[in-house]
Amino acid sequence: MSLGTEEKHAQTMANTLAEADYRGRYRHGLTSLEMILEDVDIGACRPDYKPKILKETPAIAWVDGAMNLGPVVGNFCMDIAIKKAKEVGIGWVTCKHSNDYGLSTCYALRAYNVGFIGFACSNSPAMVVPTRGKKPVLGPNPICLAAPSKREEEGVIMDMTTSTVDWAEIDQYKIKGQELPKGWAATKDGTETTDISQATYLLPLGGTEDRSGYKGYNFILMVEILCGILGGGKFGPYVKETHSARDPANLCHTFFALDPAKFNPAFKLHMQDLTAALRSTDSVTPDTPVWIAGDPERMHMKAVKEAGGIRYSKKNLQTFEEIAFKYGVTPLKAKDSCYFPS
Amino acid sequence: MSLGTEEKHAQTMANTLAEADYRGRYRHGLTSLEMILEDVDIGACRPDYKPKILKETPAIAWVDGAMNLGPVVGNFCMDIAIKKAKEVGIGWVTCKHSNDYGLSTCYALRAYNVGFIGFACSNSPAMVVPTRGKKPVLGPNPICLAAPSKREEEGVIMDMTTSTVDWAEIDQYKIKGQELPKGWAATKDGTETTDISQATYLLPLGGTEDRSGYKGYNFILMVEILCGILGGGKFGPYVKETHSARDPANLCHTFFALDPAKFNPAFKLHMQDLTAALRSTDSVTPDTPVWIAGDPERMHMKAVKEAGGIRYSKKNLQTFEEIAFKYGVTPLKAKDSCYFPS
């Protein structure tokens, strides 16, 4: 708000960051605040502009995000999708002129929370090499599907990048000085590497061609087509890590909400049956059971509740304090000693 | 038709099989005819029943495939999706009570051929172990997205199972007596194996957990939710290779068609730009360039045209002849010596 952001938009942004930390997805949480504020400062992100619908029918909408904060654009789009899904069973919304929207889960959950299937995906800066390629042409484009079950805790909430891992995971190995697993990264010449000092680009899910890495490349491309190309913003090799007002991110997202009651009336019951079958599958490693997507986040949320709050590292808290000082707002107050789970 | 199939349905079935062979996707081609006829013989497949819409809105439809041939159900659904997409930008159709629909490409192409994005996916018999799991709970559920470009030969047509490979590929290794690449198969206890004699189940794309195999598991689950659960037919562990009238396949498929002209007006131009960027990326192996999904099929179709027809092995032709004799129809005539490309 001290940057001229409307109160409700600032609230949306704060909620999205907190939700990511609550779920243990720290990369999309409060630690990204500094970068977002920088984008607002230089005018690459314009919280004073208003997202608007460019074209629509009862089932779809094409949205101009107007360079607003990613979460503001994301909620704007998903809320349109949910409204349309209530009327005609599906609402499909694709936008351009957006910024990094953080954790995809936040948007899919809006649909999930009203009993719908929710879907969100986004393009992102090019850092993944296509199968056989020497240079990155596509981003580690995230994709999320949330599907409710009869019992809330048995719904599926999958949220992942379409590369094998993202840079944050590689950075963890860098800190630990460990060798990377195969299939994660490529050298500056596009060759698979496990040497952290040589890791320059990401590999698509699957890794190398003999392990069907081209299928991961296909999933990345699918997201790029449904976002950058359908949305009409930047796409593929043209999406860069810029942080420049002259060259705004112009990211594209696609969302849909789907009302399962317009199809199988027993949808939620069948979801419960399927997820129970998955969870009760005998495990190869008995101390780590078979999960369904969303379980690791549920465990983290439980730990947060038990601890009475989200834990951050001292370094993070110091950064938050510096930010608060810079913008003249009250800093976050830590309850006790904090740590940042790795 | 000698089995009581309507002429147009028999034609649909024949076209779908021929299209798969033409594209070099032999597993879904004429060699599967014997199995299909067997299903019709025992009444697990009922070409005399008529698919019908159970519920619909201007944007979606829930269809009962009435146990008809998979391609008949598939075309019925996709044609509804295209009609709705023409009116409201998207048509989403999910069906139950279907049979194996063969090559997903066939349905996505119907949308692609009128300038739309086409999507098709299906559930399938459980033979993939979830991450950490000892037993298979999900199928190698195929997924297909076709997106047109300004120049026909630059459109993306991706069609793949969500397991690393399917059984046909493992069988190829069995014939050659070669060791399997890692990430393809698991033993009867769910452990990754490269020993062909131990390969019992399939692994999801990505393979083991350290290579993000859980993301492949998520994609399989995504298809299962959008097909088996949304469709209300068999799902997950309940989908078996049965060939039994008492226990029909009851497979579910989901299709959508999306009119890109309702979004970015430069969609096809941007598709051309993106695919050109991918194809012109320098390759790690100069004799094998960077492809886009659909390129291997295009090369096969070119070879078929140059050869003046699809080539089959002598063994296949003999089977076709036996089938023709059994049902009292004229057998296929081979033009010259045939072979079956591996």
Image (spheres, coloured by chain):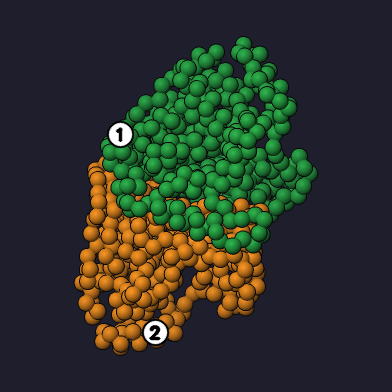
Chain colours: A green, B orange
Q: Nearer the viewer, residue B75 or A246?
A: B75
Q: Residues within 10 Å of mark 2 (few under 14, many from 20)?
A: some
| Three-letter code, disc 2 | Thr
Q: Nearer the viewer, residue B332 or B43?
A: B43
Q: Quadrant of the N terminus of chain B?
A: bottom left
* Residue B11 visible to the viewer: no
Badge count: 2
Q: Is residue A278 above or below residue A123?
A: below
Q: Which residue is mark 2?
A: B319
* Residue B78 visible to the viewer: yes
On the image, the x and y values in percent for residue A4 come to 50, 14
B304 on left or right of B64: right
| Three-letter code, disc 1 | Glu
Judged by depth in the image, the label closer to the viewer, 1 or 2, is: 1
Q: Which residue is mark 1?
A: A56
Q: Residue at x 47, y 64 (%)?
A: B237
B223 on left or right of B66: right
Q: Residue at x 56, y 66 (%)?
A: B135
B117 on left or right of A30: left
Q: Residue at x 64, y 65 (%)?
A: B191
On the image, the x and y values in percent for residue B27 come to 44, 71
Chain for disc number 1: A
A83 on left or right of B284: left
Helix, strand or loop at disc 1? strand
The numbered disc on residue A29 is: none
Q: Is residue B63 above or below residue A27?
A: below
Do marks 1 and 2 both belong to one polypeptide chain? no
Residue B306 found in image quarter: bottom left
Q: Nearer the viewer, residue B63 or B268?
A: B63
Q: Is residue B88 above or below residue A308?
A: below
Helix, strand or loop at disc 2? helix
